[in-house]
Image (spheres, rainbow, N blue to C red):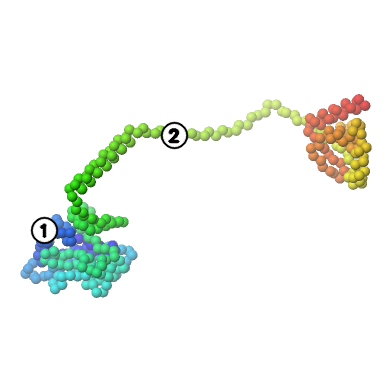
Amino acid sequence: MLVDLGKVVHYHFDKVTHRQKPNFTPNTNFQILYPSATNNYIIEEEDTNEPPVLRARPTWVSSDENKDQIQKEIILEALNQQQFTIGRSMKREVQIKLKAVSADHCQIGYSNEKGWSISEKNKDKLSSNGTFVFMKSHNQMIEHEPSDLIPLHDGMVISFINYEIRVNLEKKDASVIQNEEQQIKSANEHIAKTNSEFQTTVKAHAAVKVEETKIEHVPVAVSEVVHVPEPVVVVAKVDVNDQHGVSQQDHHEQEKDASPLAEPSIHHEDEHVHVNLNESKEEVDHVQKPAEEENVDGEINIVEEVKHAEAVHHAEVANLELA
């Protein structure tokens, strides 16, 4: 069989002999690991006077531990001694110097009635990381065979890789068992009813996936050529003295004396219109100026839109003809 000490080392008990066949009846405090193997006990011959022997060898050591700190082979002979203690302390008959092994970890004993047994009882306290017996023998693990049936007892701990289960056996009356069976039956009926309702449920259709189509812009050729007339430039001459040489008061008096009914003096020269700023301010404002720029000669160029400039030009020509 295989024994795990502290979950850091496994020992395979590959040789176990007895003085006679054990006949102790199992109970909650004493369990036979492999009941089917009770007929396979190895009995020492009486003529040889050899004591019962137990031999164990390590098969696995955790990578977190030092392999040199374990017993390479454990041999116990039940000649004058019946109990053997195992632990990290030097006071133990079998010393295993691993950190996860307690100072007084467990003990192995022998008696003619029980044979060889391993336990943590009759100690001051239990080990920190426990002692576990594998459900499979070493040969079953090598051959990948299923384990034997092992009886459960109260307080038994079944350890898996990442968790453990503790067995608690409780005595129950027949009425309690019947009530629990009825609850289990009702729960199963509820589950069956729920499953039948799910089977009649209409399966929802998946939503239709809408894909967007990208529209490419196609250039359109122009069949006719559009002629845009050139803009007409209107130039207004401004006397520089009005800004630098003439005082603000004189300029105000000139604007006051100006008659609002006086017609502006317009001279038509080479498609340029000269406007005298001394004339009526309302008539000058009739020429809308979107932008003004002052050059070196003191002239302000007023650029108007094409259609408006042509209208002003035709009006001026008409006024000249009437004059």
Q: Position of residue 80 (x, y in %)?
A: 14, 73
| Residue picked out by circle 2 | 207
Residue 191, quarter of the rendered image:
top left
Quadrant of the image for the C terminus?
A: top right
| Amino acid type at mark 1 | Asn
> In the rendered image, which quarter contains the N terminus?
bottom left
Residue 132 seen anywhere in this rendered image of the structure: yes
Q: With respect to residue 260, does 24 lie above or below?
A: below
Residue sitting nearer the eye, 195 or 106? 195
Asked if residue 64 lies left or right of residue 258, the reply is left
Circle 1 residue:
39
Residue found at the far top of this picture? 322
Q: Position of residue 30 (x, y in %)?
A: 17, 61
Q: Tell me the residue at 92%/34% (across/down).
A: 259
Element type at marker 2? loop
Label located before the other in sequence (2 or 1): 1
- How far, Cα to Cα, is label 2 from label 1? 70 Å
Q: Position of residue 103 (x, y in %)?
A: 27, 70
Single out the residue that lies furthest toward the left: 47
Q: Residue at x 86, y 34 (%)?
A: 282
Q: Report the front residue among 200 and 142.
A: 200
Q: Residue lying furthest bottom in this view?
A: 91
Report crowding for label 2: few under 14, some 14 to 19, many 20 or more residues within 10 A (C-alpha).
few
Q: Residues within 10 Å of mark 1 (few under 14, many from 20)?
A: few
Q: Amino acid at mark 2?
A: Ala
- Marks counted in the figure total 2
Q: Secondary structure at mark 1?
A: helix
Find residue 179 and report its horizontal and vertical position in percent: 22, 45
Depth check, mark 2 against mark 1: the one in front is 2
